[in-house]
Amino acid sequence: MIFASNAFASNSYITGNVKFNSDIDARLGSESGSMVEAGYGSDVVATIEAGHAFDNSFGDLTVYIELDGLQLGTVDYIDTPYTMLGIEQSFSTGENFWVAAGYQNVIHQGDSIESRMLVRLGYDFDSGVSLSHRTRIDLDSSDYKRFRTRFDNSIAYSPTNFNAAFSYNNIYYLMDEGTNSIKHEVRATWTRNGVQPYLEFGYQDDLVSTHGFAVDNYTTVIGASYAF
């Protein structure tokens, strides 16, 4: 999910991007296919997400759908897209501090392959700096003993006199088996009215490749978001 759940109350949004991978065998480089045996096998993939936030007595309830793993580039392994259905409830705790909890289900070729539970919290400073953390547990739908835990720690800055936002996200994948992995993402967003384009660069080490060995993957992401 791209947006914080409290950022677009009672609004709809749509966002999409194209990701360029340096390693065609990268298996964990995409959000939804992380526990799939074969992986994507494409050096360029696209993602589309849409959702809506509803006001309620607790805060905001956001429902969303994502299509991930749309293969666009050179393909080493042909795979169909992954569909992720999500729901997330934010809780009003004050003017600057926010908390949210949610559930996601990943579907591939008509089957549920992964269930996810997540908790997020953050604090928005008046200076334009914001801090956030997310813990997400991904369970294999065919074997709940097979899981991984993902930790996201982010810092972002939105200057008050400049239509831009900058963020850094550190992602750590703790695997129940196999090699743990860490990922770094740096993003710049043009926070104009209407469509907001963004550019992101990432690096992830020790990915489990489609051939079963660890690889390093560099990513370049070009995308845009629109809230209405």
Image: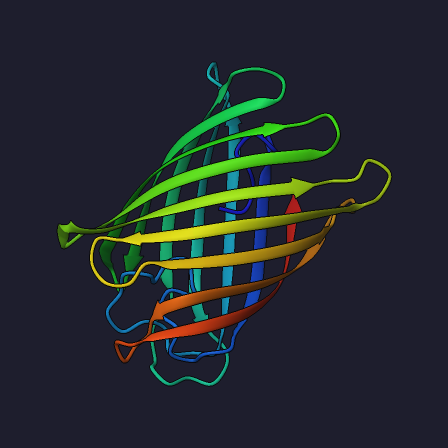
Q: Where is residue 32 in the image (x, y as percent from the top left)?
A: 37, 58
Residue at x-position 65% and y-position 42%: 156
Report the side of 31 relative to 11 (left or right). left
Which quadrant would residue 40 be assigned to in this image?
Answer: bottom left
Report the side of 100 relative to 159 (left or right). left
In terms of depth relative to the viewer, which is nearer, 166 or 117? Answer: 166
Report the side of 195 relative to 71 (left or right). right
Residue at x-position 84% and y-position 43%: 162
Residue at x-position 25% and y-position 76%: 212
In terms of depth relative to the viewer, which is nearer, 175 or 9? Answer: 175
Model colouring: rainbow
Q: Position of residue 141 (x, y in %)?
A: 18, 51
- Does any portion of residue 12 appear in the rendered image? yes
Q: Where is residue 70 in the image (x, y as percent from the top left)?
A: 45, 69
In this view, 63 is above or below 69: above
Which quadrant would residue 130 be assigned to in this image?
Answer: top right
Q: Residue furthest right?
A: 161
Quadrant holding the C terminus: top right
In this view, 125 is above or below 4: above
Q: Where is residue 16 in the image (x, y as percent from the top left)?
A: 57, 58
In this view, 42 is above or below 54: below
Which quadrant would residue 127 be assigned to in this image?
Answer: top right
- Does any portion of residue 228 appear in the rendered image? no
How many numbered discs, if any?
0
